[in-house]
Amino acid sequence: MCFELTDFQITLNNEALFEPFSLHIKAGQIGAITGPSGSGKSTILSDILGVLPAIFSRSGNIRLNEKDITGLPTGQRHVGIFFQDDLLFPHLNVFENLVFGIPAKLSKKEKAQKISSALSHAGLQGFEKRDIATLSGGQRARISLLRTLLSEPKLILLDEPFSKLDEELRDQFRSWVFKQIQLQDIPAVLVTHDARDIPESAVKIELEVSYA
Ligand SMILES: Nc1ncnc2c1ncn2[C@@H]1O[C@H](COP(=O)(O)OP(=O)(O)OP(=O)(O)O)[C@@H](O)[C@H]1O
């Protein structure tokens, strides 16, 4: 598994948001994109996901596992996203939230097994019937990432994933997330404004903004 952006640039109203860059990451590796507010970090993730708003245009290529995915609709890209607002369904329990992430082709039993094993991995064994409202912030965050991982993405995007967590939880959750990405053996693109969120081993890109 590998992910590449080549000579990548996004333009808004004929003005480039940042200088072109290339990024190459392998399975289990993190590509970390930083840059000033408004430099285009979230827009880059939207484009990788396949939902770049029409007002923007892109030059360069997006390749996942050696295949150019630029023309593919979102549903065929197999890209998972995780961000600070966890978007769990508050009226459904943990099991019902997680089952949304699982490919529909699996049987009921297989789905239940996958969920049980994922919860154990996250230190949340037996949480299937818990209401979302009864979970702590850190537990919610873990459930939310599990849901993304259960969809078996080929690439995961992390958009300011830790910014809503308090200091202590943030450290724990960050290490846990990076471990899950390695276990899943997929590449990940991380967008953050906080250097503490970037692991040593990450491939780092700092967006260069050229102000007119
Ligand atoms: N739908 C939109 N319509 C018009 N301009 C937009 C739209 N979305 C984003 N922009 C502009 O595009 C630029 C890049 O925005 P983007 O959200 O990608 O930046 P960012 O680096 O993620 O910023 P931040 O760190 O503040 O979240 C900004 O100047 C923003 O105002």
Image (cartoon, rainbow, N blue to C red):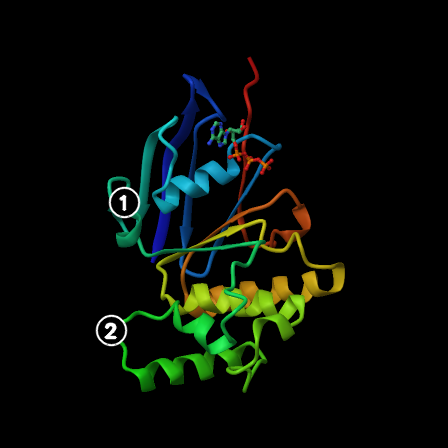
Task: Name the amino acid type tagged 1.
Answer: Ile
Q: In the rendered picture of this protein, how many numbered marks are placed on residues?
A: 2
Q: Residues within 10 Å of mark 1 (few under 14, many from 20)?
A: some
Residue at far top of view: 212
In which image quadrant can residue 172 be found?
bottom right
- Residue 192: x %, y % from top left: 59, 45
Secondary structure state at the residue bearing disc 2: loop
What residue is shown with label 2?
Answer: 105
- Residue 185: x %, y % from top left: 41, 65
Q: Quadrant of the N terminus?
A: bottom left
- Residue 29: x %, y % from top left: 47, 56
Task: Name the amino acid type tagged 2.
Answer: Lys
Secondary structure state at the residue bearing disc 1: loop
Residue 105 lies, with reference to residue 60, above or below; the image says below
Q: Is residue 165 left or right of residue 141?
A: right
Considering depth in this image, is 168 or 208 the residue closer to the camera?
Answer: 168
Could you tell me which residue is drawn at 48 percent across and 25 percent down? Answer: 19
Could you tell me which residue is drawn at 57 percent across and 30 percent down? Answer: 38
Residue 59 lies, with reference to residue 126, above or below; the image says above
Disc on the earlier residue, 1 or 2 = 1
Residue 53 lies, with reference to residue 137, above or below; the image says above
Could you tell me which residue is drawn at 55 percent across and 12 percent down? Answer: 212
What residue is shown with label 1?
Answer: 69
Residue 2 lies, with reference to residue 94, above or below; the image says above
- The alpha-carbon separation of the residues under discs 1 and 2 comes to 24 Å
- Residue 90: x %, y % from top left: 54, 66
In which image quadrant can residue 139 be found?
bottom right
Considering depth in this image, is 41 or 138 the residue closer to the camera?
Answer: 138
Q: Is residue 169 left or right of residue 116?
A: right
Q: Is residue 85 left or right of residue 112?
A: right
Residue 19's mark? none
